[in-house]
Image (cartoon, rainbow, N blue to C red):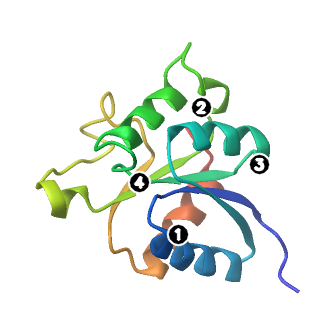
């Protein structure tokens, strides 16, 4: 039996992508749930208390993922109580819109701990998850 490592919330509107990520995470001992938009994200965070969030950018709108990250990291916003939960933004926005981001240079606009461009190899995703959970959010 696999020792459970904690819960990861995957905010992803594409069911196929969620299922691929879920299989990888659950095979490595994590439990998972999915939120498809901003409203579901708030509900799932409250219900599941995740150890990490994987967040897409383009959900119901082209910038909804940015709005969720902002809600999580900005004092006074709806999800700020969970500001310590690490966030991996995993998106194809670079390929789709030609935008390039990094948490280091875009921290005010992109308040996440890691930015991964889809498709992400499982080994890269797991290495980033393990790194962030081990380090805790600074």
Q: Residues within 10 Å of mark 4 (few under 14, many from 20)?
A: many
Quadrant location of the C terminus in the rendered image: top right
Seen from this angle, which residue lies furthest front? 60
- Residue 48 has which mark? 3
Residue 127, given in percent of the width and then of the height, sits at 51, 71
Q: CA distance from mark 2 to mark 4?
A: 17 Å
* In contact (CB < 8 Å): disc 2 and disc 4: no
* In contact (CB < 8 Å): disc 3 and disc 2: no
Q: Residue tagged by mark 4?
A: 56
Near-viewer residue (69 or 13): 13
Q: Secondary structure at mark 1?
A: helix
Near-viewer residue (112 or 23): 23
Residue depth check, mark 3 versus mark 2: number of the one nearer the observer? 3
Q: CA distance from mark 4 to mark 1?
A: 10 Å
Seen from this angle, which residue lies furthest right? 1
24 vs 108, left or right, is right
Q: Please identify the quarter of the rendering in which residue 45 is found.
A: top right
* In contact (CB < 8 Å): disc 1 and disc 3: no
Q: Residue tagged by mark 2?
A: 83
The residue at the point 56 percent across, 46 percent down is: 86
* Between discs 1 and 2, the one toward the N terminus: 1
The residue at the point 49 percent across, 21 percent down is: 74
* Between discs 1 and 3, the one toward the N terminus: 1
Q: Note whether 96 is above or below 112 in the view shown.
A: below
- Residue 18 has which mark? 1
Q: CA distance from mark 1 to mark 2?
A: 23 Å
Residue 126, given in percent of the width and then of the height, sits at 54, 72
């Amino acid at each position: 039996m696999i020792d459970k490592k904690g819960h990861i919330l995957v905010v992803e509107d594409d069911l196929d992508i969620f299922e691929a990520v879920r299989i990888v995470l659950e095979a490595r001992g994590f439990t998972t749930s999915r939120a498809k938009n901003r409203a579901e994200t708030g509900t799932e965070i409250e219900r599941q208390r995740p150890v990490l969030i994987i967040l897409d950018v383009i959900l119901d709108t082209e910038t909804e993922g940015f709005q969720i990250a902002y809600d999580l990291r900005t004092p006074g916003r709806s999800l700020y109580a969970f500001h310590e939960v690490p966030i991996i933004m995993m998106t194809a926005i670079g390929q789709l819109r030609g935008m390039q981001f990094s948490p280091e240079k875009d921290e005010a606009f992109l308040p996440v701990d890691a930015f991964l461009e889809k498709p992400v190899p499982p080994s890269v995703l797991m290495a980033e998850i393990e790194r962030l959970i081990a380090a805790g959010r600074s």
